[in-house]
Image (cartoon, grey):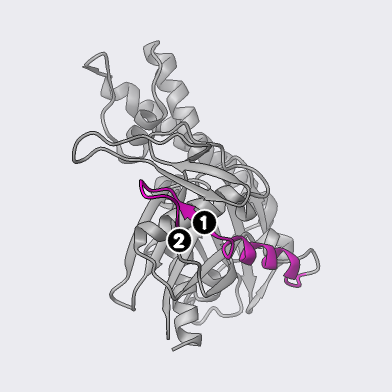
């Protein structure tokens, strides 16, 4: 491309940024953690986190991993000042410099109207959200962050489905199940067209729901409270849990993990099959999102497989498409 492209999957749980040429992709992942107002925290020590304060139309926000973050689970998150700041923070972290282009997505339900035509109004609002200035507070005063010269808005999951290789089964549908932090989205494409009757979103059903269940089970078994970060690291990264300096028994943690994953996977399976009617006719079921690996073995579909890079599947598909269109 003539200018640097940054592809951004701005999820409820994490902001994923991808840049670079094929074979030299650079990936950045930052948690979607911010709080309204100025809650600046200085880092102590070389490895300590330092928060960042941003100003924009609609408010001031502090971004930092240790903050009591605001809930991103609201309907207009994708077009909110909070989303704008989180994306700008991630782009700043990734080293974005003017001029650059930004590719970012909208959920299928927002990108298209009920009749299957693009929702131009919603797309325009999303684009303007990332063209609105954001300023970073520094000791020398606010600094304007670079604004993208071009903002491409693409539908989430759709490009992944369209680019899936199904060999000689081109007459069969392809399903993409995007298991995110807060939601699970199902997209079904058949012969190059979206089957909107089989697409949808399962709210409050994703990795966060499994963390909630896991945390509750361990707390019930031990009679002690866990922090959210400890529960998340134990469930996803299988890190040991220590309370008052003592390790929690491995069998307690393992049982809680297995039950949490199985319970959420069962709800997810029911919801997906209710929305898509069936996945039996699909040539492939592609699992993407941060929960793809966590739930892959617990889902019942024998033809399901995790994308080769599930966390960056959307960003990579957008990046590849736009590179082909703008060599």
Whole-angstrom CA distance, mark 1 to mark 2, is 6 Å
Query: Given the current orientation, which residue lies at the most extreme left position?
Result: 46
Asked whether, in this view, residue 107 is left or right of residue 224, the answer is: right
Position of residue 122 measured from the top left corner of the image (x, y, whole percent): 71, 63
Judging by the rendered image, the residue that carries numbered circle 2 is 145
Q: Position of residue 151 (x, y in %)?
A: 56, 72
The reply to whether residue 28 is in sight is yes
Q: Nearer the viewer, residue 209 or 190?
A: 209
Q: Residue at x 54, y 72 (%)?
A: 159
Instruction: Classify mark 2: residues with Cα within 10 Å, few (<14), some (14-19) or many (20+).
Output: some
Question: From the viewer's perspective, is residue 89 above or below residue 315?
Answer: above
The residue depicted at 46 percent of the width and 68 percent of the height is: 7
Q: Which mark is residue 134?
A: 1
- Queried whether the magenta region covers residue 302, the answer comes back as no
Which residues are drawn in magenta? 116-144
Pick whichever, 45 or 16, lies toward us.
Answer: 45
Contact (CB < 8 A) between labels 1 and 2? yes
Residue 179 makes an appearance in the image: no
Figure check: 161 above or below 225: below
In the rendering, at what x and y percent does residue 31 appear?
42, 46
Q: Is residue 132 found inside the magenta-colored segment of the image?
A: yes
């Amino acid at each position: 491309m003539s200018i640097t492209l940054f592809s951004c999957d701005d999820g409820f749980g994490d902001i994923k940024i991808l840049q670079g040429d094929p074979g030299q992709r650079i990936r950045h992942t930052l948690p979607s953690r911010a709080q309204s107002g100025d809650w600046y925290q200085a880092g102590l020590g070389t490895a300590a986190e330092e928060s960042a304060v941003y100003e924009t139309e609609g408010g001031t926000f502090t971004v930092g991993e240790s903050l009591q973050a605001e809930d991103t689970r609201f309907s207009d998150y994708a077009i909110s000042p909070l989303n704008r700041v989180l994306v700008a923070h991630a782009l700043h972290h990734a080293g974005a410099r003017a001029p650059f282009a930004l590719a970012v997505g909208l959920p299928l339900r927002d990108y298209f109207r009920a009749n299957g035509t693009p929702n131009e109004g919603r797309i325009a609002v999303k684009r303007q959200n990332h063209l609105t200035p954001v300023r970073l507070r520094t000791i020398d005063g606010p600094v304007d962050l670079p604004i993208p010269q071009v903002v491409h808005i693409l539908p989430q999951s759709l490009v992944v489905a369209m680019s899936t290789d199904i060999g000689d089964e081109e007459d069969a549908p392809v399903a993409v199940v995007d298991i995110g932090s807060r939601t699970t989205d199902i997209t079904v494409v058949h012969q190059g067209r979206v089957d909107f009757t089989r697409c949808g979103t399962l709210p409050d059903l994703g990795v966060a729901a499994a963390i909630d269940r896991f945390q509750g089970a361990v707390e019930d078994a031990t009679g002690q409270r866990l922090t959210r970060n400890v529960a998340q690291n134990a469930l996803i990264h299988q890190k040991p849990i220590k309370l008052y300096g003592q390790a929690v028994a491995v069998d307690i943690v393992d049982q809680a993990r297995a039950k949490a994953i199985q319970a959420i996977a069962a709800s997810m399976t029911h919801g997906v099959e209710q929305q898509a009617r069936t996945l039996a006719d699909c040539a492939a079921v592609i699992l993407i999102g941060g929960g793809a690996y966590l739930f892959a073995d617990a889902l019942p579909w024998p033809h399901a497989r995790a994308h080769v890079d599930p966390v960056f599947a959307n960003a990579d598909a957008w990046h590849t498409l736009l590179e082909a269109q703008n060599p």
